[in-house]
Amino acid sequence: MRRALPLLAMLVGTFLTTHSMTAGAAEYPLPPDNSRLIGENTTYVVPNDGKPLEDVAAKYQIGLIAMLEANPGTDPYLPKAGTVLTIPSQMLLPDTKREGIVVNLAELRLYYYPKGEDKVIVYPIGIGQLGRNTPEMVTSVSQKIPNPTWTPTANIRKAYLKDGITLPGMVPAGPDNPMGLFAMRLSAGTGQYLIHGTNANFGIGMRVSSGCIRLRPDDIEALFNSVPKGTRVQIVNQPIKFDVEPDGKRYIEVHQPLSHTEKDDPQTKPILLTAAMKKFIKSDDTNAEIVKEAIRRRSGMPVVVSVGDKATDMPPAANAPQTVSADTPAVTTASTQ
């Protein structure tokens, strides 16, 4: 599935009648400096309630694309009742400094490391759509804005007009504001990039914005109330994360890379391997065949690639989601280890 959705899909999402349930912020104990693996995957059986996949994603603090990476073939608008979905809650921390806010564009996640606390809080995000990319940078929070107004740029108004939508010169603060109720301006550039909320129940975990970083309403409120002005913000683009854990297990986590053109298919688009990644693959301790399959699969979940493991040990969501009896328990553990 391409990350750049048509504007129509965004607008349809704003009129969804269901209200997404939220389970609070996804907090994880911070692992030691020599470890980057956090969390554990679970499974969820889709009830016969007619709700979209976004409802499940929001309940478990997951982005929509992440749910589709982990569960290929799932209908995002009406997942089939009885389908067992993998909830991809296990991940590798980005290979960055553990300070302030870290955004990994490729995985559509924001990591917040509260100062003086031994934890990391992870939020799914929406980022810049094709042609309005969110750039990689190291910057900081320069301004915190409660109840922001939205002044769409001339280019944004022109783009909407092509779809028959006439935007006002300024949208006042309130529940109808596409920026939501909270915004944090970044100091980079002219201050045109913000981390803000949304008034829609659709689009988090996707490329939907004009370059800003978008969070669900409850998430931006929590982040806004926790992040001090001046907090460091680092934005990276790491479609492949890899790590050797203290127990010797070697992991790789592969996400669909960001598209550069409309013709790009993120599921087949080549991923540039860094020198460090090539060294990791060539190691005598790495099973290169599993790495190759993980890069092809792009599940967005950590996979053990140590020598001695078999290629069949891929995450259970590598195949089309299975259907089970409605009597199956709603949530069970399903660690990828």
Image (cartoon, helix red, strand yellow):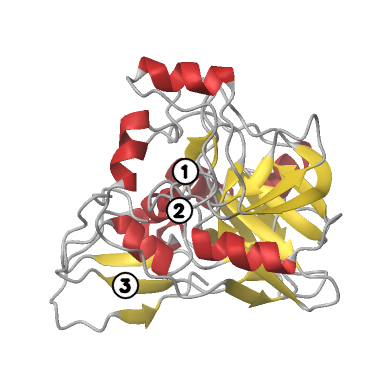
Q: Amino acid at mark 2?
A: Pro
Q: CA distance from mark 1 to mark 2?
A: 21 Å
Res. 160 mark:
none
User: Residue tagged by mark 3?
Assistant: 44
Q: CA distance from mark 1 to mark 3?
A: 21 Å
Q: Is residue 287 visible?
A: no
Residue at 31% of width from left, 31% of height from top?
8
Horizontal and vertical percent position of residue 74: 26, 52
Q: Amino acid at mark 1?
A: Met
Which is more N-terminal, label 2 or label 1? 2
Which is more N-terminal, label 3 or label 2? 3
Residue at 47% of width from left, 74% of height from top?
335
Which is more N-terminal, label 3 or label 1? 3
Q: Secondary structure at mark 1?
A: loop
Q: Is residue 124 visible?
A: yes
Q: Secondary structure at mark 3?
A: strand
User: Residue tagged by mark 1?
Assistant: 206
User: Residue tagged by mark 2?
Assistant: 175
